[in-house]
Image (cartoon, grey):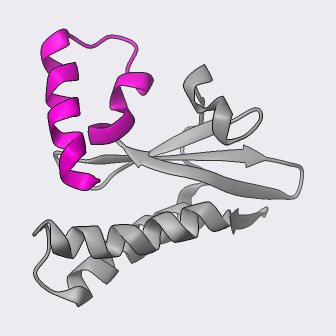
Amino acid sequence: MKEVRIHNDVVVYLAGLFDILIEKGYFSFYGSSAQYIDDITGFIKQNIHTAPQKVAPKHFAKYGHNMSYVAYRRNKRTTWYISFEQTACHYLIRYITNNHVDGQFLWKKHGKKQHRRNIAFAHLLF
């Protein structure tokens, strides 16, 4: 089985996400925020080998070469997208985002109403 490596930029992002989840009121307790982050990283480590992979759109080329991504539906409203480079011996996680922030770049067909909703929710996370 290939090794899963996480780029330092992603580690920094997840550390910041921990604080954002508390500050924005998504979670009231640090333990809940930590568990949320652990669920994301756990999904990556356990499922990246078997989850359906898709070629990442050109928009994500700025994060790496020959990028692919897998989706992790955390709940009814939020799907996380894990972008990575793959070699013969490992997966390198280069970028993590969700449907509220970058969903418009991943959905092939979406209406203007959905796009506006994504933009409106994006400010909640960052």
Choose between 79 and 117: the one closer to the eye.
117
The quadrant in which residue 28 appears is bottom left
- Residue 49 in sight: no
Q: Is residue 45 left or right of residue 3?
A: left
Taking the magenta stretch, the answer to whether it contains residue 63 is: no
The quadrant in which residue 113 appears is top left
- Locate residue 19, reporting x and y percent: 29, 75
Q: In percent of the image, x 66 and y 34: which residue is there?
A: 62
Q: In percent of the image, x 89 and y 50: which residue is there?
A: 88
Taking the magenta stretch, the answer to whether it contains residue 122 is: yes
Name the dominant secondary structure of the magenta segment.
Answer: helix
Choose between 23 and 42: the one closer to the eye.
23
- Residue 86 in sight: yes
Q: In percent of the image, x 16 and y 47: which residue is there?
A: 76
Q: Compared with residue 104, is residue 8 higher up or lower down, i.e. above or below? A: below
- Locate residue 119, reporting x and y percent: 22, 31
Q: In percent of the image, x 68 and y 36: which residue is there?
A: 67
Q: Where's the N terminus, which quadrant?
A: bottom right
Choose between 29 and 4: the one closer to the eye.
29
- Locate residue 40, reporting x and y percent: 42, 65
The quadrant in which residue 18 appears is bottom left
Q: Is residue 51 left or right of residue 18?
A: right
Q: Residue furthest right?
A: 88
Q: Compared with residue 65, is residue 1 higher up or lower down, i.e. above or below? A: below
Choose between 125 and 27: the one closer to the eye.
125
- Locate residue 26, reporting x and y percent: 13, 67
Which range is magenta?
A: 99-126
Q: Compared with residue 112, is residue 7 higher up or lower down, i.e. above or below? A: below
